[in-house]
Amino acid sequence: MIWKKISVETTIHAVDLLSEFLSEQGVEGIMIEDNQPLTEDEIREMYVDIPLVGDAQDESATVSFFLDNSYSDTDIEKLAESIREELKRLEEFLPVGSGNIDMSETSDDTTWNDNFKNYFKPVRLYKDIVIMPVWEMDDPDNDFVLNEDDKIIKIESVMAFGTGTHETTRLCLGLIKKHINDMSHIKDDISLMDVGCGSGILSIASVLLGAGYVHGLDIDPQAVEASRINAAASGMSEDRIDFSCGNLLAGNMIAESYLENNNDALDEIKNKVEKASIGSGISSVLSPEEAAKMVDIENGVSDPVPMRKYDIVVANILADVIIPLSSVIKDYLEDGGVFICSGISDNRVDDVRIALMNNGFTIIDEEHENEWHALAAVL
């Protein structure tokens, strides 16, 4: 879809009031860009795997938002005039900057893909595993040093969430490497499922580490497409790695007795489970108590790949998704299989431990980096 992007040049002093004004005008979703560096505490608290660059500091800011084709040119000009009047009113109390308003057309996918490339550089993800954007491979300014035994994940598409540089990815990869190595002593052709595969980085890394077959699953079709592109760029065939669009929490169940004569509760839980869908960076607020009470609420689509059992199942998502997932993932594990989960913050790790144990798992490994945790469990 082609969107109209409206950007307002202002200051950090005016962004909150201007954003509130835009919300009152019916604008949904506002992007704020400024030159104020994040503190170390802010960086640790954010689930960010985009390398943060630049250290400029000034008080300028840009407030941007996107309008779809339901807005006519006349509607947009009226909104722009309202913004100018609001900035003029705010100027009596605080600095508002130039107030310049820029209007342009943009494709959300293309713009994201192109702009992101400016910030995505080669990175050593884990000891001998390197993520290498293909556009950097022939760049004469690329001074990244490769070692002879490096395993290289080549990234061609960044349409989907995930560049692999976040702590949770490294933690998850460390456990994948350990358990593939352990299993390789007792069996060949290890199979692995990557739930919420994002851009396919963990799936591709798993093949490089020795998995015989990897199935990556994501609820987002763009993530599936990006994963396939990146796997092909890394030289992997479909008989070793395959991706599909689906949701293991589709048809998740909540107890009828809990919802009896309570339509508001049904709507609330439908909304929560929709947010808990397995996918790229999607969080939820589904409690363990709600996840334990089961009637079909018909959410999402099931995985089109025939169901099978895997030696290892990986979920690098968020605690609020892992908790309900722990009640269904056992159906996808071979006897002696390992469930590896990551994306778990300090304040949720106990909740995940309890959910795993309540569903019959025994935790056999735990790794952490800063405020993030990864667990490995068996039935």
Image (tube, rainbow, N blue to C red):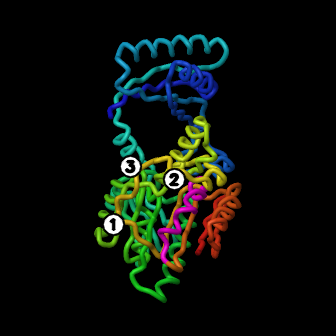
Front residue of 177 and 300: 300
What secondary structure characterizes most of the magenta part? helix
Res. 234 mark: 1
Q: Nearer the viewer, residue 65 or 116?
A: 65
Q: How far apart in space, not on screen, are marks 3 and 2 (Cα)?
A: 28 Å
Front residue of 290/114: it is 290
Q: Nearer the viewer, mark 2 or mark 1?
A: 2
Residue 22 rendering spot, x and y as whole percentages: 53, 22
Q: Residues within 10 Å of mark 3 (few under 14, many from 20)?
A: many
Tag 3 residue: 159
First along the sequence among labels 3 and 2: 3
Residue type indicated by callout 2: Asn
Amino acid of disc 3: Met
- Please identify the quadrant where the N terminus is shown: top left
Work out how far the residue at label 3 is from the one at label 1, CA to CA, in angstroms: 17 Å
Residue 261 at least partly seen: yes
Residue 152: x %, y % from top left: 39, 69
